[in-house]
Image (cartoon, rainbow, N blue to C red):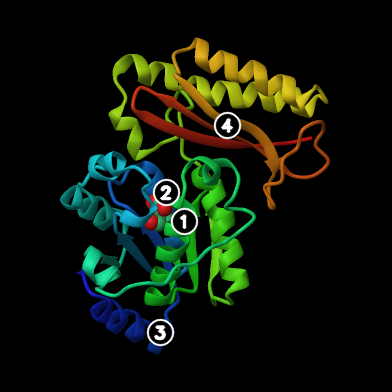
Amino acid sequence: MEIVRTVKDLRAKTRQWRNENQSISFVPTMGALHKGHISLVHNAKSIADKVVVSIFINPTQFNEKNDFSCYPKEEKKDIEMLEKAGANLVFIPTADEMYPKGFSSSVTVSGVSDCLCGGSRAGHFEGVATVVTKLLLQVLPDVAVFGEKDYQQLQVIKRLVQDLDVPVKIVGSPTMREKDGLAMSSRNARLNEKQRHAATNIYAVLNSIAIDASNGLDIEKACEHGKKALIDSGFSYVDYLEIRDAETLEIRKKTIDKQARIFCAAQIGSVRLIDNIAVSF
Ligand code: PAF
């Protein structure tokens, strides 16, 4: 596995692969890798000849300075995990490499970016859309793999790739969960024992709402009960707990007539957790 830190070195390697007719899949990450990321790498490996992984903690997608400065940095461990997972190339650029002096462009995806996390994290999806556009144009992969854990991010990226004619197929990969159902996330490491225990309630609440919704019960009522259950279990704040269309992310208030998902973001201690699941009907 090779490690490159500049766009020039990255392009030299991917150009060589393209000339050899090798297909390329790409997994963008911010590091602090866990089994969820590794499952994305395995998925990427199963669909292309070569796998490129990027590690870049993108400053422009953090709307809170503290969240950015607290973000775990574990480069050595990440590299070992990627080597073991069979990645072929790791791209680890510096902030100056990604945003050189004078950088002044951005990518905005309206509609799917506006609701859910877009409502409470100003500028977050613009930061994500801009860095992902850059990374896709730097790597020029055939396929890029994103986790469904960040389902809204996945829809934002699908939209931008379609709108801007970026020649890449975007693939969503299922959320990896701990044995007790908690969605794997780099943020879980910041939970103390009590918070970690309470955190499992997100998945439990999502499942209970999914059952109610697919049985035709009142969606809004089910979500209200779910919010109360989360607060009672130790969450300080529920940012959202909503059922939305799986593609357009338009809100579903009464009944579901099309593929839908339940989305949740909730705060426990200093940690904001998100999760989502599909609702069958
Ligand atoms: O999902 C993430 O880790 C980040 O948002 C991404 C896609 C790597 C962009 O910085």
Spatial distance from mark 2 to mark 3, Cα to Cα?
A: 25 Å
Of tags 4 and 1, the one toward the viewer is 4
- Read off the residue under disc 4: 240
In this picture, is 36 found above or below 159? above
As shown in the figure, which amino acid type bears the numbered disc 3? Answer: Arg
Spatial distance from mark 4 to mark 1, Cα to Cα?
A: 30 Å
Which sits earlier in the primary sequence, circle 4 or circle 2?
2
Which sits earlier in the primary sequence, circle 2 or circle 3?
3
Element on which disc 3 rests: helix
As shown in the figure, which amino acid type bears the numbered disc 2? Answer: Ser
Element on which disc 2 rests: helix
- Read off the residue under disc 2: 39
Q: Tell me if label 3 and label 1 are in contact, CB under 8 Å.
A: no
- Read off the residue under disc 1: 43
The 10 Å Cα crowd at callout 1, few under 14, some 14 to 19, many 20 or more, is many
Of tags 3 and 4, the one toward the viewer is 4
Name the spot of residue 41 as percent of width and height, x first.
Answer: 39, 56
The 10 Å Cα crowd at callout 4, few under 14, some 14 to 19, many 20 or more, is some
User: Could you say which disc has been placed on residue 108 in the image?
Assistant: none
User: Quarter holding the C terminus?
Assistant: top right
- Read off the residue under disc 3: 18
Quadrant of the rendered structure where residue 164 is? bottom right
Front residue of this view, candidates 13 and 114: 114
Spatial distance from mark 3 to mark 4, Cα to Cα?
A: 43 Å
Name the spot of residue 212 as percent of width and height, x first.
Answer: 74, 22
Spatial distance from mark 2 to mark 1, Cα to Cα?
A: 6 Å
Q: Is mark 3 within 8 Å of ligand 1?
A: no
Name the spot of residue 119 as percent of width and height, x first.
Answer: 55, 43
**Residue 235 in sight in this render:** yes
Which sits earlier in the primary sequence, circle 3 or circle 1?
3
Q: Tell me if label 2 and label 1 are in contact, CB under 8 Å.
A: yes
